[in-house]
Image (spheres, grey):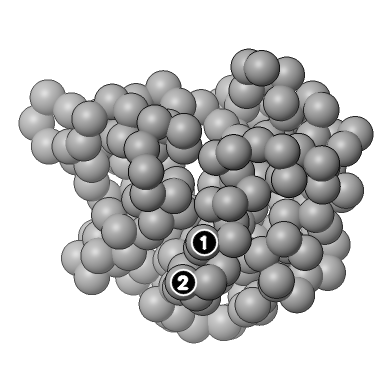
């Protein structure tokens, strides 16, 4: 079954997909046992560009039940939603499907990792463990910081000459998201225009 077919099925039978998919449900179980979700903040599944939910409500709820996390639609744990939720999202955005950051190799390249570093079924460690391991330390070297409701925002940039470039965003020491960008200058210009604004579907509350 392709990831597209799996995502379509997850819209109708989310709990069954989590139970049956060998790289998905067990990974969430492992992440929950290791308390990896605790270092991630909160996010809404309503995309800031489209104004629509990119993860179906049934899947949103099934993911949080599986992870043992409290959540009230449409706000949930950013780590859970931006990794496993985005993998199963079928809703296109102006930048494409949310899952592509984990599959197409651009984000991995920005972190100077092998192309399949974030492909969830390609390696033994869970996707969340792999992402957290490289993204959380990046917040210690931000290129922009700002105060605001819910805690200090930090924006980090990763990438080297000849590689893709990505941003890492966090609030109050917790990760919110990471994704590849075509233009860091554009991201910084947008940040500088309104440094205190919550970005990339973040919310100030902490879920967990």
User: Is residue 84 at all visible to an observer of this figure?
Assistant: yes
Q: Nearer the viewer, residue 153 or 86?
A: 86
> Measured along the vertical axis of the image, is residue 87 above or below residue 33?
above
How many neighbours does mark 1 have within 10 angstroms: few (below 14), some (14-19), or many (20 or more)? some
Please tell me in which quadrant of the rendered image residue 119 appears: top left
- Residue visible at 64% across and 49% down? 25
Q: Name the spot of residue 9 as percent of width and height, x first.
A: 81, 28
Q: Which element is circle 2 on? A: loop
Q: Give coordinates of residue 144: x percent, y percent.
A: 30, 63
Which residue is pictured at 62% across the width and 23% down the height? 3
Q: Residue at x 45, y 46 (%)?
A: 127
Whether residue 86 is visible here, answered yes or no, is no
- x then y, percent, for residue 69: 70, 72
In the image, residue 90 lies at what x, y percent?
Answer: 73, 27
**Can you identify the residue that label 1 sits on?**
30
Q: Is 14 left or right of 202, judged from the image as shown?
A: right
User: Which structural element holds mark 1?
Assistant: helix
Label 1–label 2 contact, CB within 8 A: yes
- Disc number for residue 47: none
Residue assigned mark 2: 34
> Seen in the image, is 96 located left or right of residue 34?
right
Q: Quadrant of the N terminus?
A: top right
> Label 2 neighbourhood size at 10 Å, few (<14), some (14-19), many (20+)?
few
């Amino acid at each position: 079954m392709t990831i597209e077919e799996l995502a379509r099925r997850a819209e109708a039978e989310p709990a069954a997909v989590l139970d049956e998919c060998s790289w998905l449900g067990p990974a969430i179980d492992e992440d929950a046992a290791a308390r990896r979700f605790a270092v991630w903040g909160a996010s809404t599944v309503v995309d800031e560009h489209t104004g629509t939910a990119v993860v179906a409500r049934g899947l949103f709820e099934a993911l949080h039940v599986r992870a043992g996390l409290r959540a009230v639609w449409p706000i949930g744990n950013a780590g859970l939603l931006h990794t496993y939720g985005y993998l199963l999202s079928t809703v296109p955005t102006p930048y494409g499907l949310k899952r592509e950051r984990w599959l197409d190799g651009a984000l991995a390249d920005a972190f100077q990792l092998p192309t399949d570093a974030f492909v969830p079924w390609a390696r033994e460690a869970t996707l969340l463990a792999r992402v957290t391991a490289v993204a959380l330390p990046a917040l210690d070297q931000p290129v922009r910081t700002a105060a605001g409701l819910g805690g200090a925002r930090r924006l980090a940039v990763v990438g080297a000459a000849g590689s893709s470039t990505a941003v890492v965003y966090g609030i109050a020491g917790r990760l919110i998201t990471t994704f590849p960008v075509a233009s860091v200058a554009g991201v910084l210009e947008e940040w500088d225009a309104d440094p205190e604004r919550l970005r990339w579907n973040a919310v100030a509350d902490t879920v967990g």
